[in-house]
Amino acid sequence: MIAAPGLGGRESAIVCAVWVGVLLVVLALPSPWGLGAFESNQPAVRIVSFQWNASFINPGGPAVILTVENTGSSSIVYLSASLDYRPFEMGFLSVSTASPLEPMQSVSGHWILIGPDSPYCGSLYDWTISGNFSSGSGFEVHTSAPFTCPPPDVSQAAGVFSEGNP
């Protein structure tokens, strides 16, 4: 047994027991210092896709769809994402305590990005995705994803060059 300086055997044992108790309490907390915050070494989520929503036309900026998958082992009850270059948080309203995002499930969010700094097709964008597990612990994942756009509509382009058109 390790003795505390200046203390007898009994007092030293009490000091060691108190420190062990404090350590166990800290490790059990659902906080950055507790084990609950480190449920695995893998990221809790991953971006499945970040793409242009071609079905919605908006003159102010593109409508986008972000799809995120829960790659962890715990249910997620709150989820939000933000493009690192824009001060705008995109919340996934369908994820809640009443409707958690279960492991290996994905969810999509639809937003309109208004402004001149809208994403460009094929470019890679940095994201911060944060949320809370059903246990109460939180997470934050920094990742990147390319902005994908649908291929051009070949049927319309072919019509322009078909026979009979000037």
Image (cartoon, grey):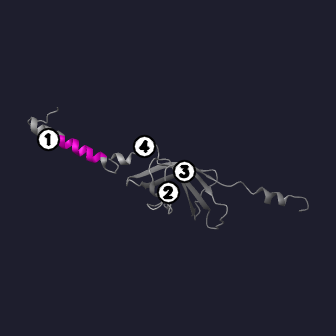
Q: Amino acid at mark 1?
A: Ile
Which quadrant would residue 154 be assigned to in this image?
Answer: bottom right
| Label 4 Cα neighbours within 10 Å, binned few <14 / some 14-19 / many ≥20 | few
What residue is shown at x 45% (from left), y 54% (from top)?
A: 76
Question: Element at badge 2?
Answer: strand
Report the Cα–Cα distance between label 2 and label 1.
47 Å
Residues in magenta, as a range:
17-27
Which circle marks residue 131 in the picture?
none
Q: Is disc 1 in contact with disc 3, using a CB cutoff of under 8 Å?
A: no
Three-letter amino acid code at the position of disc 3: Ile
Whichever of callouts 1 and 4 sits on the residue coming sooner in the sequence is 1
As measured in the structure, the alpha-carbon distance from the residue carrying label 3 to the one carrying label 2 is 10 Å
Q: Say if 79 sits above or below 1 in the image.
A: below
Q: Can you give x and y, in whole percent of width and height, for residue 114 in the image?
A: 58, 65
Q: Which residue is mark 3?
A: 47
What numbered label is drawn on residue 81?
Answer: 2
10 Å crowding of disc 1: few (<14), some (14-19), many (20+): few
Give the Cα distance between marks 4 and 3.
18 Å
Q: CA distance from mark 1 to mark 3?
A: 50 Å
Q: Residue at x 28, y 47 (%)?
A: 26
Q: Residue at x 46, y 43 (%)?
A: 42
On-image quarter of the N terminus: top left
Residue 2: horizontal and vertical position, in percent?
Answer: 17, 32
Q: Is residue 14 left or right of residue 124?
A: left
Circle 4 SS class? loop
Task: Please name the predominant secondary structure of the magenta segment in the image.
Answer: helix
Q: Is residue 124 on the magenta stretch?
A: no
